[in-house]
Amino acid sequence: MRGLPWIILHDVTVISCPRCGHSDLVVPAIEELCHVIARAIIAKRQRLTPKEIRFLRKQLGLSAIELATHLGSSPESVSRWENGRTPMGVTADRLLRLMVAVAQGRAYSLNALRIVARQEPRATHIHVRWHDGGEAMSG
């Protein structure tokens, strides 16, 4: 996945141009794939990385200004979080995860919320496999 290099996709088709050698992935359900990735990101215990923050913001369909408004923060803070100049605070991290869970219609346990974002930001490798019917599942 562009922007999230630690995402590993299994069982997807790769097509290549015979003339130039350029390759592209054929992802049958990109929207579902993004939902699966978002669920895996919000489930990790470590704080969100800058690229994960940007990915989740885009999954919510929000501009940086809109995210700042929802989090009670400034657009400059969102920019610093997404560019890695300042780590996102624990409270904002948890609220962003909760926003994503609610937007996806998912339950997010209070216990899970209590234990996330205590450790320093670190990317978590996410493996996505395609199952019959084109469903994406992480794991």
Image (tube, grey):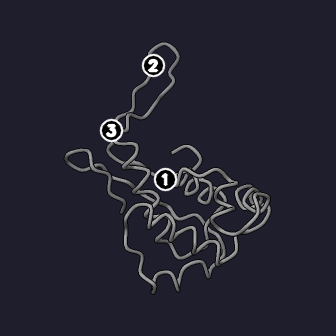
Q: Position of residue 82 (x, y in %)?
A: 70, 57
Work out whether mark 1 precedes mark 3 in sequence or the reverse, and give the earlier one.
1
**Do callouts 3 and 2 mark residues in contact (Cβ within 8 Å)?**
no
To which residue does mark 3 refer? 28
Q: Amino acid at mark 1?
A: Ile
- In the displayed structure image, the side of residue 117 where residue 89 appears, left or right: right
Q: Position of residue 53 (x, y in %)?
A: 61, 60
- In the displayed structure image, the side of residue 115 where residue 104 appears, left or right: left
- Which quadrant holds the C terminus? bottom left
Q: Nearer the viewer, residue 14 or 36?
A: 36
Work out whether mark 3 precedes mark 2 in sequence or the reverse, and give the earlier one.
2
Identify which residue is drawn at 39% across, 49% down: 33
Q: Position of residue 99 (x, y in %)?
A: 51, 66
From the viewer's perspective, is the residue at label 3 or at label 2 nearer? 3
Image height of 85 relative to 3, above or below: below
Seen from this angle, which residue lies furthest left? 132
Q: Label 3 to label 2, Cα distance in Å?
A: 19 Å
To which residue does mark 2 refer? 17
Mark 2: few/some/many CA within 10 Å (<14, 14-19, 20+): few
Q: Residue 35 is drawn in which quadrant?
A: bottom left
Q: Label 1 to label 3, Cα distance in Å?
A: 16 Å
Work out whether mark 2 precedes mark 1 in sequence or the reverse, and give the earlier one.
1
Residue 7, which numbered label?
1
